[in-house]
Image (spheres, rainbow, N blue to C red):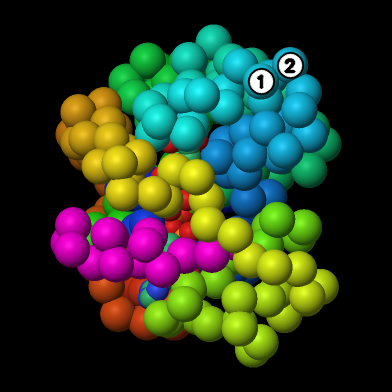
Amino acid sequence: MVHRVVFLGPPGAGKGTQASQIARELGVPHLSTGDILRAAVAAGTPLGRKADGHMRSGGLVPDDLVLEILHERLNQPDARVGYLLDGFPRNLAQAGALGKFSEVERVVSLEISPDLLVQRLSARRICPKCQSVYNLVTKPPKATERCDQDGAALVQRPDDLPEAVTMRLKVYAEQTAPLLDFYRKRGLLRSVDASGTPDEVAARIRRVLG
Ligand code: AP5
Ligand code: MG
């Protein structure tokens, strides 16, 4: 079984949804740079203050900040057994930096049509308290717009507003999509159809992880 895995895919492809489940099955931590950055923004740390504007607009946070976060996180004891990276690397510079301190074993590319992405992102809601992710269409909470876990009023991620979504899709196409070739050439890339139910997608991912 592989233990050093990267999930690639455009915003809304289902990286976070799938990674939390698959990481448990692999026995490795799920490391999402987006989740770490959002927690820093919510806590108002110096890192969060630097990242906030970039994230709201849908642009990337500068590489030096993200690399520092990643380095620190991969040095924690639970990451000794491996990792499932969600949202990192995001460009060739980050992929190069990752390759210098860890050897990735498998890269899973979640593939999906732009129409479906926009539908998923516009209906996503999150709990500001526990960060649980919902979808008003495909994974609604039991009580209208309230978190099932703690009853908090659900909110929309600021970067799920239409203008930021357009920007994120553009950034993905320009900066992140070139990583597909980068990893294909190294024989690490496996593509998975990310449409269908979460269970169907998870079954496809398990198949390519072997
Ligand atoms: P990040 O948090 O990584 O966001 P993203 O890549 O844009 O991806 P999302 O989290 O929006 O989508 P997802 O693929 O996880 O989908 P999800 O499972 O939630 O990054 C955010 C920002 O942080 C970046 O823009 C950047 O500013 C910064 N950042 C982060 N990492 C960085 C880095 N390395 N370098 C620089 N900057 C960085 O699913 C979406 C919705 O669809 C949910 O509602 C879910 O319930 C639903 N859904 C999921 N799967 C299914 C399914 N199979 N069927 C139906 N509904 C589904
Ligand atoms: Mg995510």
Nearer-the-camera pick, 80 or 166: 166
Amino acid on which the number 1 mark rests in the picture: Arg
Q: Quadrant of residue 36?
A: top right
In the picture, the disc for residue 49 is 1
Amino acid on which the number 2 mark rests in the picture: Pro
Q: Quadrant of residue 23?
A: bottom right
- Please report the residue visible at 61 percent of the width from the left and 16 percent of the height from the top: 50
Q: Quadrant of residue 112?
A: bottom left
- Please report the residue visible at 76 percent of the width from the left and 68 percent of the height from the top: 152
The residue stretch that appears in magenta: 113-126
Q: Determine contact: label 1, label 2, CB under 8 Å.
A: yes
Query: Is 1 part of what is drawn in magenta?
Result: no
One can see residue 25 in this view: yes
In the picture, the disc for residue 46 is 2
- Please report the residue visible at 48 percent of the width from the left and 73 percent of the height from the top: 135
- Please report the residue visible at 39 percent of the width from the left and 34 percent of the height from the top: 58
Residue 167 horizontal side relative to residue 157, left or right: left
Quarter the C terminus occupies: bottom left
The residue carrying pointer 2 sits among few (fewer than 14), some (14 to 19) or many (20 or more) residues within 10 Å by Cα, namely few
Q: Is disc 1 placed on a helix, strand or loop?
A: helix
Query: Is 121 part of what is drawn in magenta?
Result: yes
The residue carrying pointer 1 sits among few (fewer than 14), some (14 to 19) or many (20 or more) residues within 10 Å by Cα, namely some
Which secondary structure class fits the magenta region best? helix
